[in-house]
């Protein structure tokens, strides 16, 4: 990706010479001749480095440096001046400048210094991205099934595109793992990856998380907040469960995708940002569009490159390979390295319906690792939730309890209520807000019931 330099100098000849030199070396150059222009360009263009003349028509570098540091402290600033004093140099360095150089400066010397600073910054960003990612990357394409092999081929084709990607699939199929893989292996892999789950977030909270806010933008905004879009500049934004995004926020996200610009809450000026969007959902967004729960223009924009993750039950031949990979990781994490699966245990894993997909598979194996006493996991070490699998894979009329289970006629009212809430939560993938709507009670009431009944939820 082409790197950008902001040159701030009130002498047109100086700006021309610097621009000509650095453009010849493959860098993009934007120019400003006043403090006011520099502020606007720094905010809107997001340079990778600033060359700043100390004395300008409407101020000095000492006026600009604190503001630039407040907006983005990661961008290096190199100050040039024709009037060098020790006191001035000390003040400039204290305010956050990387270096202080006398004018006139030889362009080759300046070029070497700029190249080094840009390389250091790029390395720092890459290291931050690697720290933020998992120490050991998960492979979203484990298996031999036709569905997963076709998915890998398609995913590799879209790696270096900046167009939005929409990952669709049931809950627990590994949409986040695939999003992480797309980022790390794509052209933006050296940049940041920020993630946000849109489910259950009210409009204001979602908007301030994405776009940030200025101090005083609303009652509780006691300080300025940088949004995730700014954090993800030159990288990737992963919005999970985008189907739950509030309708009021959707047109603002569309503006970011189409114009690469956004505005913080409480701010009057647009900011420029360069991000790639990866979105994911287990919902039928086309149906949501027909129900007017999702904007059609945003849907068509984010679904430019659609990827579908198959459910685990649709590729049973992949389950043994996935289970072995998970078992290696889990046994190492839990301090029991060297665990293996008996062939009969692998057969049991293949035979199960996996309503929770990969997430449920991991939970079953983690429980087995913690509770088993041998180094080879047997079928009896694997505890499956057959009742949940039947509830999610059959219609209510078909879902009958086996004779060995207690009839609901013999249960107390609290036990019946507990079972019903468990079923609704399972059907809604653990999502409290949707489960509350289905039960016809406020979300706060459902939280109270979950607490009193000792149940847990995902959201």
Image: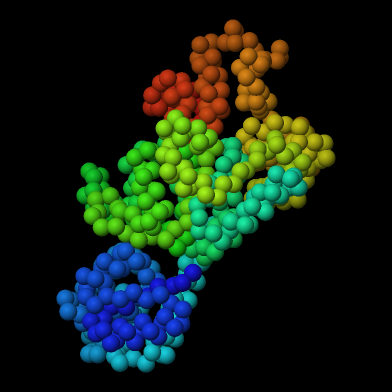
Q: Position of residue 75 (x, y in %)?
A: 37, 70
In the image, 456: left or right of 266?
right
Q: Which residue: 53% across, 23% down?
A: 424
Q: Which residue: 47% across, 22% down?
A: 438
Q: Where is 394 relative to 75, above or below? A: above
Q: Quadrant of residue 379?
A: top right
Q: Which residue: 62% across, 57% down?
A: 157
Q: Where is 363 relative to 439, above or below? A: below
Residue 381 versus residue 443: which sits nearer the camera? Answer: 443
The answer to whether any part of residue 66 appears in the image is: no
Q: Where is 117 relative to 358, above or below? A: below
Q: By what rule are the colours in the image chosen?
A: rainbow
Q: How many marks?
A: 0
Q: Where is 390 relative to 202, above or below? A: above
Furthest residue toward left: 58
The answer to whether any part of residue 167 appears in the image is: yes
In the image, 75: left or right of 425?
left
Q: Position of residue 59 (x, y in %)?
A: 18, 76
Q: Position of residue 72 (x, y in %)?
A: 34, 65
Residue 239 versus residue 23: which sits nearer the camera? Answer: 23
Q: Which residue: 24% across, 90% down?
A: 82
Q: Position of residue 190 (x, y in %)?
A: 52, 65
């Amino acid at each position: 990706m082409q790197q950008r330099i902001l040159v701030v100098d009130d002498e047109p000849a100086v700006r021309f010479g610097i621009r000509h030199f650095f453009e010849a070396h493959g860098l993009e150059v934007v120019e400003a001749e006043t403090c006011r222009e520099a502020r606007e360009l720094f905010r809107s263009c997001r340079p990778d480095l600033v060359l700043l003349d100390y004395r300008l028509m409407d101020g000095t570098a000492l006026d600009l440096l604190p503001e630039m540091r407040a907006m983005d402290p990661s961008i290096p600033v190199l100050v040039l001046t024709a009037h060098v004093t020790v006191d001035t140099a000390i003040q400039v360095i204290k305010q956050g400048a990387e270096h202080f150089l006398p004018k006139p400066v030889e362009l080759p010397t300046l070029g070497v210094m700029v190249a080094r600073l840009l390389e250091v910054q790029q390395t720092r960003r890459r290291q931050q991205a690697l720290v933020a990612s998992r120490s050991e990357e998960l492979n979203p394409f484990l298996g031999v099934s036709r569905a997963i092999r076709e998915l890998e081929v398609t995913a590799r084709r879209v790696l270096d595109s900046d167009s939005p990607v929409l990952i669709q699939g049931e809950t627990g199929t590994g949409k986040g793992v695939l999003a992480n893989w797309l980022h790390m292996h794509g052209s933006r892999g050296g940049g940041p990856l920020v993630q946000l789950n849109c489910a259950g977030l009210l409009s204001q909270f979602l908007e301030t998380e994405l776009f940030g806010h200025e101090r005083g933008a609303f009652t509780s905004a006691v300080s300025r907040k940088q949004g995730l879009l700014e954090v993800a500049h030159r990288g990737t934004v992963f919005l999970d469960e985008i189907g739950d995004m509030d309708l009021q926020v959707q047109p603002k996200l569309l503006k970011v995708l189409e114009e690469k610009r956004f505005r913080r809450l409480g701010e009057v000026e647009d900011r420029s940002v360069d991000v790639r969007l990866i979105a994911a959902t287990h919902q039928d967004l086309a149906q949501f569009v027909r129900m007017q729960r999702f904007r059609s223009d945003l849907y068509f924009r984010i679904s430019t490159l659609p990827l579908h993750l198959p459910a685990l039950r649709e590729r049973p031949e992949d389950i043994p390979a996935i289970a072995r990979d998970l078992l290696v990781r889990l046994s190492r994490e839990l301090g029991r390295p060297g665990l293996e699966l008996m062939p009969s245990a692998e057969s049991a894993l293949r035979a199960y319906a996996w309503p929770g997909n990969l997430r449920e598979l991991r939970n079953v194996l983690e429980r087995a690792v913690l509770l088993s006493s041998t180094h080879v996991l047997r079928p009896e070490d694997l505890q499956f939730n057959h009742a949940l699998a039947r509830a999610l894979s059959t219609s209510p009329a078909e879902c009958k309890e086996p004779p060995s289970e207690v009839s609901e006629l013999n249960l107390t009212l609290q036990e019946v209520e507990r079972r019903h809430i468990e079923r609704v939560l399972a059907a809604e993938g653990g999502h409290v807000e949707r489960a509350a709507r289905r039960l016809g009670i406020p979300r706060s009431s459902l939280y109270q019931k979950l607490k009193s009944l000792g149940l847990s939820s995902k959201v």
